[in-house]
Amino acid sequence: MSAETKAALDDAISAHFRDVMNGSIVTGYLLQISGESIEDLNANHWSALREVSEGQTFLTTLGLSSYVSNSLAAQMMESEA
């Protein structure tokens, strides 16, 4: 990812978070993206990309990942009940 694209992504995430969370600032993020190309579809493959906040520590990324995983699991359990 180019430096310009990364800066635009960081700015957009910060602006969105600030809007949604009443002015709070971003201290870290984990953006997980999946996608497929025509070649992937034909081969039954998919691609994944992860982006994190600039300078974010591994422990912060791991914590965000665990939080998302646990939250999704809890939502799935609730919807099955």
Image (tube, rainbow, N blue to C red):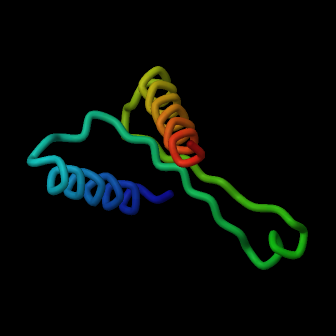
- Outermost right residue: 43
**Which of 30/53 is in front?**
30
At x 86% / y 66%, what residue is drawn?
Answer: 44
The structure residue drawn at horizontal position 9% and vertical position 47%, both measured from the top left corner, is 23
Q: Nearer the viewer, residue 72 or 40?
A: 72
Q: Eyeballing the image, is 4 above or below 76?
A: below
In the image, residue 1 sits, relative to residue 67, either above or below, namely: below
In the image: residue 14, left or right of residue 38: left
* Residue 30 horizontal/vertical position (percent): 45, 42
Q: Residue at x 15, y 56 (%)?
A: 19
**Above/below status of 1 relative to 29:** below
The residue sitting at the front extreme is 81
Q: Quadrant of residue 76?
A: top right
**Residue reaching furthest top?**
59
Q: How many marks?
A: 0
Q: Quadrant of the C terminus?
A: top right
Q: Position of residue 34 (x, y in %)?
A: 62, 59
Q: Position of residue 50 (x, y in %)?
A: 55, 47
Residue 76 located left or right of residue 47: left
Residue most extreme to the bottom: 38
Q: Residue at x 46, y 31 (%)?
A: 67
- Picture coordinates of residue 43, whole percent (x, y): 90, 69
